Amino acid sequence: MMVANGKGLLAMDESNPTCNKRFAQWGIPQNEETRRAYRELIVTTPGLGQSISGAILYDETIRQKKKDGTLIVKSLIDAQIIPGIKVDTGAKDMAGHAGEKVTEGLDGLRDRLAEYFQMGARFAKWRAVIALGDGIPSRGCIEANANALARYAALCQEAGLVPVIEPEVLMDGAHTMERCCEVTEEVLRTVFNELYSQRVMLEGLILKPNMVLPGLTCARQETVDEVAEATVKCLLRAVPAAVPGIAFLSGGQSGELASARLNAMNVRFKSQLPWALAFSFARAIQQPALEIWHGKQANVSSAQQALQHRAQCNRAARRGEYNAAMEMDNREIALYDVSSV
Ligand code: 5MM
């Protein structure tokens, strides 16, 4: 269900510090009420369930209500969107490994998962962060993060939740696309080795990887088709066919590029792939809506239109039906809305 019917996941699980950072960029007050109002805007977007199969929430959001007193979770279920929950407690500096992080959150996880299931969550998400640089990533960092992802996944399946497994190789840096491909393949192979060891059922998980991309400051930036080819080649080498779906993170790509790259993969390779290629974007779906909203009630409807537009673009990309004209049709509305903020 999470990757059926051309739909994908909406990541709206920014932790409070990350959500506040995004709000600060647009001068939006950073407090519990503005975060609640923003999440209400997202889940009440008309027609969102046409493109979005599941939404990943943060602990604060899964407990929050809309202004009318309805739980946000209920609003999602009514829109036929499956509620999910981020359960890691963040990527922390890794001891003895300068410049590297290890994701925490296993302590007490069994009890937290039982509570989230009871609150309506049916899938969970855990993100590991792998940075590229001189001498990194180290084997120690890759192995520690892969082991944590696998132990989290086993606990999720025990609790009746689908684990979304997110090993993110970051875009930051001047590395080449080839280097990203090499590291992504090593990370994925290690993650799947750990998943076998921890007896995780491959049919009952979703992989949320990065696309294979050149570093943000790399001089050579490959074309959309080159990125699509490198990403699919890398995934075919490392991801078992039993996995039902791969839902990419956007990682800081623009919304348009993320859609174009996903579309190119589906146009060129869909018929040859064992898994569905979908999306689990946060910024690449939310960014225009956040800019338009600006924390003002008067902008809610325009912001929702922008959110719905990006969600539909990604639904089209899943089917290999996305094209630049979809953006042009929307641009006039978007420009008008931004200038009225
Ligand atoms: C990579 O971040 C995930 C996907 O978001 P993008 O599509 O914007 O890259 C996202 O789900 C992330 O894991 C959450 O926003 C939580 O992040 P923090 O840093 O707050 O734990």
Image (tube, rainbow, N blue to C red):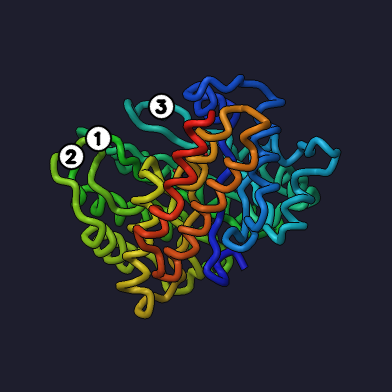
Disc 1 on helix, strand or loop?
Answer: loop
The residue located at (68%, 47%) in the rendering is: 43
- Answer few, some or many: residues within 10 Å of disc 2's Cα (few below 14, many 20 plus, some between 14 and 19): some
Q: Are marks 2 and 3 in contact (CB under 8 Å)?
A: no
Residue 168 locus on image (x, y percent): 40, 45
Q: Earlier in the sequence, mark 2 or mark 1?
A: 1
Q: State whether residue 332 is above or below residue 96.
A: below
Q: Are marks 3 and 1 in contact (CB under 8 Å)?
A: no
Residue type, label 3? Ala
Q: Nearer the viewer, mark 2 or mark 3?
A: 2
Q: Quadrant of the C terminus?
A: top right
Residue type, label 2? Cys
- Name the residue that disc number 3 marks: 95
Q: How far separated are the C-alphas under marks 3 and 1?
A: 22 Å
- Name the residue that disc number 2 marks: 218
Horizontal arrangement in the rendering, residue 78 relative to residue 283 (left or right): right
As drawn, the residue found furthest toward the left would be 219
Q: How far separated are the C-alphas under marks 2 and 3?
A: 29 Å
Badge number at residue 173: 1
